[in-house]
Amino acid sequence: MIAHEYDIKAKTRTSATGVTDINDFELESVGCTDARQLLNDPGISLYAMDTANQIAVFVASGTTGTLFEAPFYYMAQYEAAERVFTISFDIMIRLAQTIDVESRRLIFIFSTGRAGSTLAGRVFSQIEDVVTISEPDVLTALLAARLNASCNDLKLKELLVASVRLLCAGVLEKQIVIKVRGSVIELCDWLIQCFPDMKSVFLYRDAESWLSSSMRAFVGSTGDPDKGVVIGERAYRSRMARLVPMVARFDEGTHLSYAGILSLIWLSVMERYMKLRSQGIEMPAIPFKNWLNSPLETSESMLEYCGCRPDSMKTVCDVLFKDSQAGSHLSKKNLLNRKATEKKDVDELKKHLSRHPFINRVDFEVPGSLCPC
């Protein structure tokens, strides 16, 4: 089994939050190696999926332990990457078949984003024999492939299983928490089919404060609607259309502002959660207000539901009041002076909510909330 090896001549990623891609690097081929090396070296991790060329992309970036400690796994991979390896999808699947991941050891954190999911991952990480992988982006790439039919479903499910196995390869004896990007909740049904004994939770936030937080994190300042902003909105919409069904379905002839795009992202994730519940999928929900009002009790309930509550919560207490995204470009310090929403943004949010058949209030609460202990 052959893996192609590359030196990194330059790092060329232009969007810190964009989906990982082999084009994040300018590469120079240095030959081939045995693909089994990718499993034997703890410093090599699965980074991206190139569905167009049917290849999986790995990076050598020090030890995976450092990646597990990062607020965002994919960002830490990129920043620490020293070399790149690629293998075909078929070889990836064959490699992964040698890895036995017990589904009872898997916990998935789904969320709208900006709702305490990074904090939840930090909470899990404080528990002995628990590892958190915070936003491995290969799952985001597989979501895009599913929504855009760039690969048949059977192959995608094989790749999904292979990706989870490879992500967990070095920590099979531990409980493994995988926190995903918001839109990846679209893959929840497949994940449960493939890993039937996994646990999962869903974190969400009221629409108005979520919009304000998301504008600050992902847009900064929309400013006046001049030509530059419109071009930016169109580019952002194009990226999100690959990942968010409601954005993809929205009338192509109608322009969407940043606030409009974000409104559809929130709605799409919330609607997906409701659909999963209607299909009988058990996934307790944690409102963001619970983290604000009773963080310790919320942590206890979440850990107990997932079967990994410790005898002492001391180490958990130590992280509850720290910035869980410190050290990343989404840290509170970096977002402090960014402009959030204006009245027109909130008005646009409410316009999109008013069109939805049942998620039609900014304070919409989903059923199945996990009450604090």
Image (tube, rainbow, N blue to C red):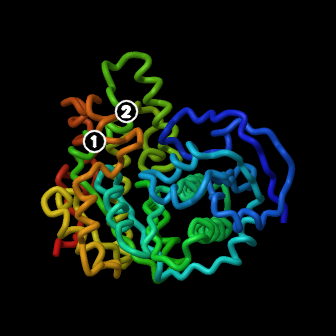
Instruction: State the image coordinates of residue 181 (x, y, percent, origin top left).
Output: 44, 54
Image position of 142 with respect to 201: above or below: above
Q: Nearer the viewer, residue 89 or 46?
A: 46
Spatial CA distance of label 1 from label 2 is 10 Å
| Point 41% across, 30% down: residue | 255
Question: Residue lying farthest top?
Answer: 226
Q: Earlier in the sequence, mark 1 or mark 2?
A: 1
Q: Is residue 212 above or below residue 4?
A: above
Q: In front here: 23 or 296?
A: 296
Instruction: Locate residue 341: give its quadrant.
Output: top left
Q: Residue furthest right?
A: 31
- As drawn, 196 above or below 29: below
The residue to which callout 2 is attached is 219
For disc 1, the marked residue is 213
Q: Residue at x 35, y 38 (%)?
A: 217
Q: Which residue appears at 22% of the width and 72% of the height?
A: 370
Q: Residue at x 25, y 76 (%)?
A: 312
Q: Residues within 10 Å of mark 1 (few under 14, many from 20)?
A: many
Residue type at numbered disc 2: Val
Residue 271 in sight in this render: yes
Q: Is residue 191 left or right of residue 213?
A: right
Work out whether 318 lies above or below 107.
Answer: above
The one of 367 and 163 positioned closer to us in this rendering: 163
Residue 124 screen position, x and y as percent: 36, 68
SS at badge 1: helix
